[in-house]
Image (cartoon, rainbow, N blue to C red):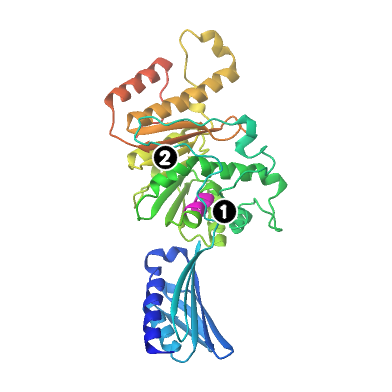
Amino acid sequence: MKKQIIDKAYFLISATVGRLEEGGDFFEGIDVSFKAGMKDFKLTAEPGDGGSLCFIFAGEPECLDAQGFCDFIAEKMRDYDEMELCYRERGRLITVKCDGKDVKLSSTETAGRTVKPAKKAPQIFAGSAEVPDVSYDDSEGDLLGGGGASLGNREYIIKAGPASNLLKVIGILGKNGKVRNDRIRKYNQIDHFVELIGPIVESVCKGNKPVRIIDCACGKSYLSFVLNYYIKEVMGRRCYFTGLDYNPTVIEASKRMAEELGYKNMTFIQTDIGAYRPEEQFDLLLTLHACDTATDLALNFAISNNISHIVCVPCCHREMNSNYSLPGFEPLMKYGILKARMADCLTDALRAEYLRAVGYDVSIVEYISPLDTPKNLMMRAVKQRGVSEELLESFKKMESSLGTKLSIGRR
């Protein structure tokens, strides 16, 4: 191959392999094919220790750094008529192809890259003080998914084809690659989750820096895995996830799933939320079905660590139910189920008001159908301003009038 072709190819190969410097956690491998006449000579380079690239060519094993690998390819090109290098990373395939006449660079997305949701998502925080709420649409069945327990005509954001590996690992798809009948409702739920938080994710992903997300009381982290896929492979953005949970069993399960999927951008830590001290700044906090005061601990964590975006799906609300009162409505408190349900609503309303007092704009929406669970609210918050002493005082008065003291705000 001519020297001018090799030099041009070397420049493009170096730029392509240079993606390892910032995107090594998303790197999958490099396939190279050399052609002489009718014969092909191939190698596959995989990540090794210390950022090296390891491969076997002509029976000889090699482990080289990025620069050494590029030099190796350029040197071998002298002996062949054509060369094709395919750099594989999550969600993208970059190809450098050259022959005796020209060098071509191409980039192909390998995931279903459509960020258009099934229905227009609510516009969040477009310079206003409040956020429009979205309610459950009964005309379309639960979760806006065409009847809840059927796939219907929903235009899925997390598409079963491109996301098949992910959906198999989290149990949505069977071995045959089809959505399991007993997981259709769950599939609708996770897709609707992405739809609802889409505007927040787009806000977080502005700019070029990697997005850092923490999942407090992560459990098996299914929705973090889905969001990881969406941000990296659908939106094409670098992202890093940290999952916290005190339960070692679910932490180990999450680690196994991340390893199986090759999601090297996820870290899982067994710890109490209050004991964790972050080493980096997070952009988004998730806390989904964190029981009782664990939700408040997660919200306090977001506030204390200046996390600008929050997505919270509260679970049980035992704290208020055990000690609140409604002066003048004492006869109604004899109905235990009504007292508990009012405690749920009052707890989440006070949480929202406290977040507003410390500078967040807050939206509360119905996350899934109440037919699935009464714990079906999603709270979304974005930090927009500083603390309001007036709103803090109002929050304290509301607590006092109810004769209760919530864990939110106790930092």
Question: x and y percent of residue 74 in the render?
Answer: 41, 85
Give neighbour class at mark 2: few <14, some 14-19, many 20+ (Cα, 10 Å).
many
Q: Residue at x 41, y 73 (%)?
A: 17
Q: CA distance from mark 1 to mark 2?
A: 25 Å
Q: Amino acid at mark 2?
A: Ile
Front position among marks 1 and 2: 2
Question: x and y percent of residue 111 in the render?
Answer: 54, 59
User: Residue 322, labelled with which disc?
Assistant: none
Taking depth in this image into account, of 81 and 169 the one nearest to the observer is 81
* Position above or below: 75 against 23: below
Question: x and y percent of residue 71 in the render?
Answer: 38, 83
Q: Is residue 229 highlighted in magenta? A: yes
Residue at label 2? Answer: 310
Classify mark 1: helix, strand or loop.
helix
Q: Is residue 120 highlighted in magenta? A: no
* Position above or below: 351 against 184: above
Taking depth in this image into account, of 125 and 259 the one nearest to the observer is 125
- Residue 17 visible in the displayed image: yes
Q: Residue at x 37, y 86 (%)?
A: 4
Comes first in the chain, label 1 or label 2: 1
Horizontal side, residue 51 vs residue 91: left or right: left
Quadrant for the C terminus, please: top left
Give neighbour class at mark 1: few <14, some 14-19, many 20+ (Cα, 10 Å).
some
Q: Residue at x 40, y 50 (%)?
A: 205
Main SS of residues in magenta: helix
Classify mark 2: helix, strand or loop.
strand
Taking depth in this image into account, of 301 and 18 the one nearest to the observer is 18
Q: Write the start and end of the magenta stretch as one range.
A: 225-231
Residue at label 1? Answer: 253
Question: x and y percent of residue 310 in the render?
Answer: 42, 40
> Quick check: marks 1 and 2 in contact, CB under 8 Å?
no
